[in-house]
Image (cartoon, helix red, strand yellow):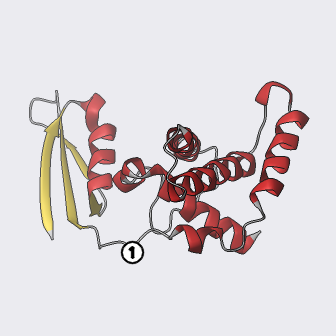
Amino acid sequence: MIEIRIICDPADADRVTTALNSAFAIGAVRDYPTRDGKHRRLYVTADHRPELGPWPTPDEAYTLAPSMVSEIGWTAQAAVDKPFGKDLDREYWLRKAALLDRIALQDEADGFHGDACEVATEAARRLIERDRDGEGDHRGTPYWPEHPASAADPRAYVRQEYAHWTKNH
């Protein structure tokens, strides 16, 4: 366990707390003014985050997935039903990101090195951004959208979320 004291500008207090929370498992933040009243003193008890389990493998994530042809049809129809991409829900973005990940995985297995990996990664980042902004219903188990591992491996985040979605949908 670690006891941390930070003196910062009042405008930075929320950002500092968020950064601490992403790096450590923290308790309640105790917030006091400094003697001069110009800064804030933040006290927090922190501990290392427990080691999280591994990401789901592609086989684990996509075991219950419909065929890729079926998913292509579903995502295309969903996009057509919402003109200009407005009001597309999380299910659309999750299924689209998972489909693109599956295409990229197939290309990688076939030894083809096109842009499918980049497209799948960008779709995964979009899902993470949506979930981080509170527009999604992410499960965050074991990794939540703000976790550094999600940023480091966005396609694995999609697999985590898709595995949960298929088991509960």
Residue 119 falls left or right of residue 73: left
Name the foreground residue: 106 vs 5: 106
Which quadrant of the rendered structure holds the C terminus? Answer: bottom right
- Residue beneath the point at 29% across and 73% down: 50
**Residue 54 placement (x, y as % from top left):** 40, 72
Q: Is residue 146 left or right of residue 127?
A: left
Q: Residue at x 9, y 35 (%)?
A: 35
Q: How many marks?
A: 1
Q: Is residue 106 visible?
A: yes
Looking at the image, can residue 139 be seen?
no
- Report the side of 93 relative to 101 (left or right): right
The residue furthest front is 111
Q: Which residue is mark 1?
A: 53
Task: Report which quarter residue 24 is drawn in.
Answer: bottom left
The image position of residue 14, as x and y in percent, is: 33, 39
Query: What secondary structure is marked by label 1?
Result: loop
Q: Estimate how packed mark 1 is, as few (under 14), some (14 to 19) or many (20 or more) residues with alpha carbons within 10 Å.
A: few
Q: Residue 43 appears at what percent x and percent y?
A: 18, 53
The amino acid on which the numbered mark 1 sits, given as a three-letter code, is Gly
Given residues 23 and 7, the one toward you in this image is 23
Task: From the top left corner, tell me how far across and down residue 39 is, in percent.
Answer: 17, 32
Query: Which residue lies at the image location 40% right of the left edge and 47% below the top edge?
Result: 151
Residue at the location (64% across, 43% down)? 135
Tell me the quarter of the image containing the N terminus.
Answer: bottom left
169 relative to 73, above or below: below
Occupied quadrant, residue 110: bottom right
Closer to the camera in the image, 113 or 76: 113
Q: Is residue 143 left or right of residue 92?
A: left
Towards the viewer: 131 or 17: 131
